[in-house]
Image (tube, coloured by chain):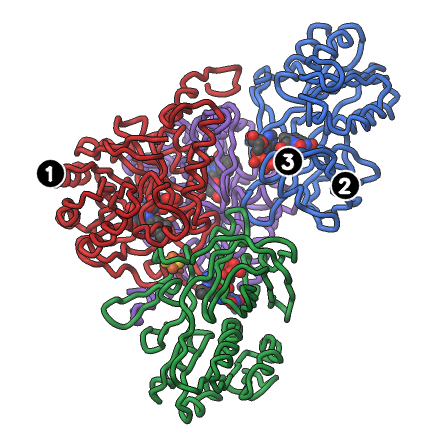
Chain colours: A purple, B red, C green, D blue
Amino acid sequence: MTVKIAGVSLANPVMSASGCFGYGEEYASFFDLRRLGAVVVKGTTAEPCAGNPPPRMAETTGGMLNAIGLQNPGAVAAREKIIALQHYSVPVIVNVSGHSAAQYRAVIELLDDLAAVAAYEINISCPNVKAGGMAFGTDPAVVVGLVRELRGATKKPLIIKLSPNVTDVTVIARAAVEGGADALSLINTLLGMAIDMERRRPVLANLTGGLSGPAIKPVALRMVWQVSSAVDVPVIGMGGISGARDAVEFLMAGASAVAIGAANFTNPLVCPETVEGISAYLAENGFASVKEIVGLAKKEWLKMGDESGCGKK
Amino acid sequence: MTVKIAGVSLANPVMSASGCFGYGEEYASFFDLRRLGAVVVKGTTAEPCAGNPPPRMAETTGGMLNAIGLQNPGAVAAREKIIALQHYSVPVIVNVSGHSAAQYRAVIELLDDLAAVAAYEINISCPNVKAGGMAFGTDPAVVVGLVRELRGATKKPLIIKLSPNVTDVTVIARAAVEGGADALSLINTLLGMAIDMERRRPVLANLTGGLSGPAIKPVALRMVWQVSSAVDVPVIGMGGISGARDAVEFLMAGASAVAIGAANFTNPLVCPETVEGISAYLAENGFASVKEIVGLAKKEWLKMGDESGCGKK
Amino acid sequence: MLKLQKLEIIKQESVAPGHQRLTLAKGINALAGQFVHVRVSETYDPFLRRPISVHDCTEGRLVLLYRTVGRGTELLAAKKAGETLDLLGPLGNSFPLTDRPQAVVVAGGIGAAPLYYLLRSLKLAGKQVSFFYGARNEAELILRDEYRALVANYSEATDDGSAGTRALVTHLAAPVIAGLDATVYACGPSPMLKEVARLADCYGRSCFVSLEAQLACGVGACLGCVVPVKGREKYRRVCVDGPVFAAGEVFFC
Amino acid sequence: MLKLQKLEIIKQESVAPGHQRLTLAKGINALAGQFVHVRVSETYDPFLRRPISVHDCTEGRLVLLYRTVGRGTELLAAKKAGETLDLLGPLGNSFPLTDRPQAVVVAGGIGAAPLYYLLRSLKLAGKQVSFFYGARNEAELILRDEYRALVANYSEATDDGSAGTRALVTHLAAPVIAGLDATVYACGPSPMLKEVARLADCYGRSCFVSLEAQLACGVGACLGCVVPVKGREKYRRVCVDGPVFAAGEVFFC
Ligand SMILES: Cc1cc2nc3c(=O)[nH]c(=O)nc-3n(C[C@H](O)[C@H](O)[C@H](O)COP(=O)(O)OP(=O)(O)OC[C@H]3O[C@@H](n4cnc5c(N)ncnc54)[C@H](O)[C@@H]3O)c2cc1C
Ligand SMILES: Cc1cc2nc3c(=O)[nH]c(=O)nc-3n(C[C@H](O)[C@H](O)[C@H](O)COP(=O)(O)OP(=O)(O)OC[C@H]3O[C@@H](n4cnc5c(N)ncnc54)[C@H](O)[C@@H]3O)c2cc1C
Ligand SMILES: Cc1cc2nc3c(=O)[nH]c(=O)nc-3n(C[C@H](O)[C@H](O)[C@H](O)COP(=O)(O)O)c2cc1C
Ligand SMILES: Cc1cc2nc3c(=O)[nH]c(=O)nc-3n(C[C@H](O)[C@H](O)[C@H](O)COP(=O)(O)O)c2cc1C
Ligand code: FES
Ligand code: FES
């Protein structure tokens, strides 16, 4: 079940998605965090951040909108939480956010001495912060520049987290790799909105929010396929994964590992259950390692020919 | 309940979405098509088109993927079907598709003499055709050019149908208006994919397909809000509408009319039920016309101030 | 006569592990080969209706026979007698009768579901019927006693020999298709249909097969359910042009 | 002691139009003010759990009292005795007891749900309790006889005078809050809480309110359920920092 992403060895390919798992402490009372491949912690900024005013959330069909606005205690306070996570001896990936390259860099500088930090996930795709945030994720030139600058700030692996709210995700993916990304993760949330018919106004105080959950899975699978076909670095797939079946689909589409976000809210045990489910799938189908199913659907796809209009043209 | 879109008077703001209602004949056995604001027919091309090989469809959480690939009998055969629709004396909007400006133009030229055609909806956003199609919908310069050319081909209203698969939908919206669009409709489907775990390959023979249904509603609402704020022409909102509640939300977000697609498959009576539901809502809440609720959520939003962190900052 | 209606469930029986038979109150008159499109949930997960063939129909009372293979059919199986079912139908075409006095009917697994009503219809029309029922094992020869009771010439085949002959059902049917000037009907997995079609073509029998596809609308509007056909048309819709097709017309995938 | 478990539904009663009382099998020990997070469907529509307060709890047997306001609570109401419920809990903090021997409890509508257990807890702790129960009309004074039976000082207010005094419940409670050195507890709509908080502040009473918000995780991880609070922290989570807050700490929207 082990996988290696950007030089980091993981016991299995299942991570918690950033922002959906706090700093791990809440879910530690449900299961042993060692059962995870990695814990990806909440988006962390250099300074403490109060986040957006409420309401911050709205349920939608098969998913939810959030506009948390990167509420977090700041990198200095996050240090303590990350150190506490060491008890579980599970790789910790820090999700780094900011409104400028300098702010991203500051987070890394404040945390880089921590042995507990296995890698950084650079969130260039949060739709809920106004200055910067999403802008970083949609302009390839800015992405190359940002990644290059952060590359200079640390020897630890850099995972760049891509936004789905772009015309061509492979352009941004290539830019991130050009800047020096060791791996890519995708997708962050789709920008959405909810209207409260009774109150005749938007539900979210922030107006828009990020859509996550099973509803977005088809978009996520498509982008994972596209990006893993376009670049040579490993891809961490996420977006609507709610169990082993979904996870296997992402692996087959080309992801080397997966992360689970909103599904934790519905089922706090979804992460360990997914680990077990993938393991059972591999055993039942005679696969010796996770690697054997990474991109499997692409191999099958290439083999498909035209059979009188049945299947691929 | 009447609304006027691009000079066309509709008995109510509810239309069938293109591709989900054939040329009307199938649903005419469920209800009187006169009860609709307009029938938007299947994407029509100049030549007959066989469409993509099967499988063309996959169910997803709260929605579905389709890769029909614009199967249609071609504009000449479509003439007969449109003439037959005249029996119902409901405005007919022809969804026009093609792989080049000339092909779009050819459809209009083949149909323009038909009095039954109230307007054209120009599909610059179909994710399921390879040459052109989506390319038209993502490049503002191409959009201005295409709309301008079609503007020269007909005196009938032109509704430009926008793709959600872009970084900034308002850029494309403004380009369409610059080219001479009388109205805009959005959203078309989100580009997605499904993987068949058992067969270890993509479900759709076309690899990717368009995601529709309630799952995409939050994205559609957000784009309708953005576009109706960015341009002065009316917006026809669609994406996941499955009843009057959803329709009212779209109207409040800034749509002047709505269209219903995939929900017809689950409930063949969804269109007339939505008409009745909107009508009941207006009556119960003392609104004299549909117009009074168009963009209502925006007005409320502008009024909202900071109340100690409750609501808008 | 397209109808959207809610009909009461009169009976919901488990007829074998993972197989349910559901009897509805009077309300839909269907022909053998037609299907109904069932809304299994009032929510949008699952989003689409589920097509189920008419297993039997007497005086507007439908019987459905289905296998629980996923969430949709599981939700359907969870519904109890007394609850109502949201149904669209009858949909699709039906098995055509021909002027031949003999009929050969071949069923593979749950493909037997629509053939029960076909067997009854053929008998009523005075045809001499040979029925071949194949499945993986005895347990999957669902309602075998009822099928057996219906026809004089009944043969079984299983992959593991736990009932009838240990053979592919097409091997059992082959000599009869070869020797008898009969109309051939079949429903079952694609490779089986392909082989039945090949045999029928080989001996010049007219042959009709009932096909499956992922459906959305069920009424011909979405063009989602097509199968590849021979000739200029290229694709035809399972939901309205089928589910029954002349075997020579379609490509088997 | 966070627990995810399935407990059998022992009883599901309709106690008034649109109001259900649900009794669970032994398994969760909770304090007054805490809640459980209920999965109402096995599908993803609805996607999120629904938070319901503990209405009562004896020896690990929970009772919930809830109003059916939308699809989630309707799905919950459709579940029958004998079925199991997927629950997360007990979650949240609880109503604190103080050293004051007197307590004033103010309920607005379905806000009464968690206060039943609070009233029982206050009585067990030997407090003298005054309970004020307000609702739009008599029909919405859910389980009024049971509440009345619980406390000596019971007062009712309705908007339309169909039961008790025709007044806002806060007007009824005001003189008591003013005159009695009691701890004040309240649960109900935001404007009511705001007024109770104002009164308590005015007369220097310590006051605790139970708040609602849209929850996702219910365990403190998502930061989705915050309410604005006074001081540097700015926002606190309803699910773990609440649902009970000192009235002086929060802003009422
Ligand atoms: C015209 C027609 C008549 C049918 N009649 C019967 C019948 O009489 N009895 C019966 O048991 N089944 C019948 N089926 C198949 C039945 O519709 C599917 O088994 C059912 O829709 C699966 O739904 P699910 O949610 O349980 O499974 P899902 O969770 O959706 O899928 C489980 C498996 O079933 C396959 N599947 C899903 N939907 C369909 C579909 N629409 N058609 C074919 N395969 C599908 C999937 O690929 C997957 O492998 C018929 C199908 C068609 C098209
Ligand atoms: C800590 C806590 C304890 C609660 N205890 C109880 C209780 O004991 N009894 C009871 O009847 N209700 C209680 N509620 C409210 C209950 O959770 C909601 O009524 C329920 O979630 C609505 O779900 P629905 O699907 O039926 O409605 P929906 O269809 O989701 O919405 C219907 C209406 O309810 C509102 N609503 C939806 N979800 C919530 C939510 N999580 N909180 C508040 N309002 C919501 C919506 O804005 C809408 O106006 C509690 C809420 C919280 C946060
Ligand atoms: C409540 C919430 C908070 C989130 N916060 C962050 C964040 O701080 N940083 C980040 O990169 N992504 C954040 N995300 C995005 C998720 O990590 C993930 O990319 C997305 O939700 C898609 O996965 P899912 O469908 O499994 O939730 C957040 C998502 C949710 C639902
Ligand atoms: C099966 C299917 C076929 C479609 N065909 C077309 C088409 O031919 N032309 C077009 O502009 N949009 C087409 N669409 C997009 C819809 O018109 C609509 O924009 C989209 O599905 C979102 O709305 P919905 O969620 O209500 O379905 C099609 C959608 C579906 C589901
Ligand atoms: S299912 Fe829509 S055309 Fe057949
Ligand atoms: S609901 Fe997630 S933090 Fe409260």
Does B149 sit left or right of A80 as displayed? left
Give how far apart the Cα atoms at labels 2 and 3 are.
Answer: 16 Å
Q: Is residue A6 visible?
A: no
Q: Nearer the viewer, residue D147 or C161?
A: D147
Q: Specify the amino acid type for callout 1.
A: Gly
For label 2, the SS is strand
Q: Quadrant of residue A23?
A: top right
From the top left corner, tell me how far across and down residue D243 is, in percent: 67, 27
For label 1, the SS is loop
Residue visible at 38% across and 23% down?
A: B292
Q: State the residue position of label 3.
A: D68
Mark 2 near ligand 2 (CB under 8 Å)? no
Q: Chain of mark 1?
A: B
Q: State the residue position of label 1.
A: B152
Q: State the residue position of label 2.
A: D23
Residue visible at 24% across and 71% down?
A: C231
Mark 3 near ligand 2 (CB under 8 Å)? yes
D11 versus C112 height, above or below: above
Q: Nearer the viewer, residue B41 or C189?
A: B41
From the top left corner, tell me how far across and down residue A11 is, in percent: 55, 53
Label 2 vs 3, first from the N-terminus: 2
